Amino acid sequence: MNGSFYQNPTFPGLTGSTNNNITPPGNLSYQTQLSLEQSLIENILRLNKGKKVKAYVSYPDSNEWRDKVYDGIIEEAGRDHLILSDPSSGNWFLIRMIYLNYVEFEEKINYNTDYSDTFD
């Protein structure tokens, strides 16, 4: 084939094939902004650890468990999971975030938008 027929894409402002030193506008570093975007729900759930919630979940590939509601107390939250405990039954639930639609709180939500002390 003709080596000059296909060209590598170029992007304005970038030199070379990769640029790992991209700094977005503002005071936060690129990695910090990326972390905030990826874990905002996780952060909110962690701030509300110990609160009673209803977690609305959908399992699209299941006919038996298409939509389910878990009642429980937030024990832990990670980027890809939520752990709830149900004191009335003694059951614990590990819920994958990809199936989580939304969470209903039975009391006021703790919500911190000041991340200045969270990251370097």
Image (cartoon, rainbow, N blue to C red):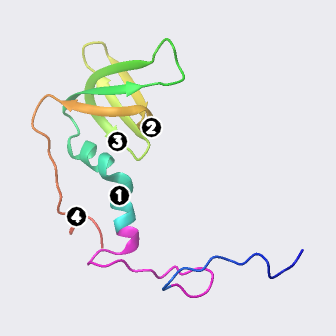
Query: Looking at the image, which residue is at 26% across and 24% down?
Result: 72
Q: Which residue is identified by label 2?
A: 98
Q: Nearer the viewer, mark 3 or mark 1?
A: 1
For label 2, the crowd category at 10 Å Cα-Cα, with few meaning under 14, some 14 to 19 and many 20 or more, is few
Query: Looking at the image, which residue is at 68% across and 77% down?
Result: 8
Q: CA distance from mark 4 to mark 3?
A: 18 Å
Residue extending farthest to the left is 108
Q: CA distance from mark 4 to mark 2?
A: 25 Å
Disc ID at residue 115: 4
Amino acid carrying label 4: it is Tyr
Q: Nearer the viewer, mark 4 or mark 2?
A: 2
To which quarter of the image does residue 75 belong? top left
Q: Which residue is identified by label 1?
A: 37
Q: Which residue is identified by label 3?
A: 77
Amino acid carrying label 2: it is Ile
Is residue 17 magenta-colored?
yes
Q: Give the magenta-colored segment's residue range.
A: 14-32
Q: CA distance from mark 3 to mark 2?
A: 13 Å
Is residue 31 magenta-colored?
yes
Query: Looking at the image, which residue is at 43% across and 32% down?
Result: 99
Q: Is residue 56 left or right of residue 60?
A: left
| Lower sequence index among marks 3 and 1 | 1
Say what secondary structure mark 1 lies in: helix
What is the x, y in percent for residue 11? 54, 79
